[in-house]
Amino acid sequence: MSEASTDRADRPAEVTDPLLWGLAAAVADAHQPDDGVCVSPSCVGAAWPCAAWNSAQEGLRAARAPQSAPAAPAGVTDERRDDPATGWSTDPAAGAEAAVPAPRDQLAVTSAA
């Protein structure tokens, strides 16, 4: 392996996912070029940049990017995603389509016999 870029001192301050950064850096270190060929035994003479090195670069970029919330499914509007913790609607007027759970104190509890 080349000089370890997984050391905390080498990690940029804008990294938001240190685990992903460390793993991606280790893969990139293992897949270095030598005369246009990847030196990793798992690549068996593949041209460089190999697929693993390219994936490691994507991982390094993703580890720096802020994590955003997943996009709402098509056709779902913001008013249907009222509760930020669950994404469930809190609007009783939305009807059964909104799938609002019953309050906990209104749930039927049965005892095991």
Image (cartoon, helix red, strand yellow):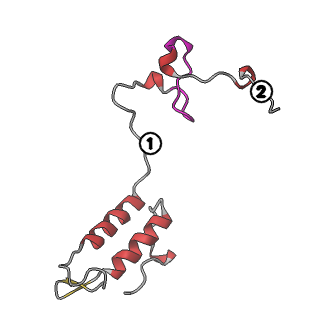
Would residue 109 be found to the left or right of residue 31 on screen?
Answer: right
| Residue 69, numbered circle | 1
Rounded to the nearest angstrom, the CA distance separating label 2 from label 1 is 38 Å
Dot 2 falls on a residue whose secondary structure is loop
> Which residue is more in the foreground, 28 or 64?
28
Q: Position of residue 96 (x, y in %)?
A: 51, 16
Q: In the image, which residues are magenta?
A: 82-95
Q: Position of residue 38 (x, y in %)?
A: 24, 82
> Which residue is more in the foreground, 106 or 33?
106
- Asked where in the image residue 28 lies, by quadrant, the reply is bottom left
The answer to whether 89 is drawn above or below residue 62 in the figure is above
The answer to whether 46 is drawn above or below residue 68 in the figure is below
Q: Amino acid at mark 1?
A: Ala
Q: Residue at x 43, y 25 (%)?
A: 78
What residue does disc 2 label?
A: 110
Neighbours of disc 1 within 10 Å: few (<14), some (14-19), many (20+): few
Q: Residue at x 30, y 72 (%)?
A: 52
The answer to whether 37 is drawn above or below residue 69 in the figure is below
Would residue 111 be found to the left or right of residue 7 on screen?
Answer: right
Closer to the eye: label 2 or 1 = 2
- Asked where in the image residue 23 lies, by quadrant, the reply is bottom left
Q: Does 6 lie within the magenta span?
A: no
Q: Quadrant of the C terminus?
A: top right
Looking at the image, tell me whether mark 2 or mark 1 is earlier in sequence order.
1
Q: Amino acid at mark 2?
A: Thr
Q: Position of residue 109 (x, y in %)?
A: 76, 26
Neighbours of disc 2 within 10 Å: few (<14), some (14-19), many (20+): few
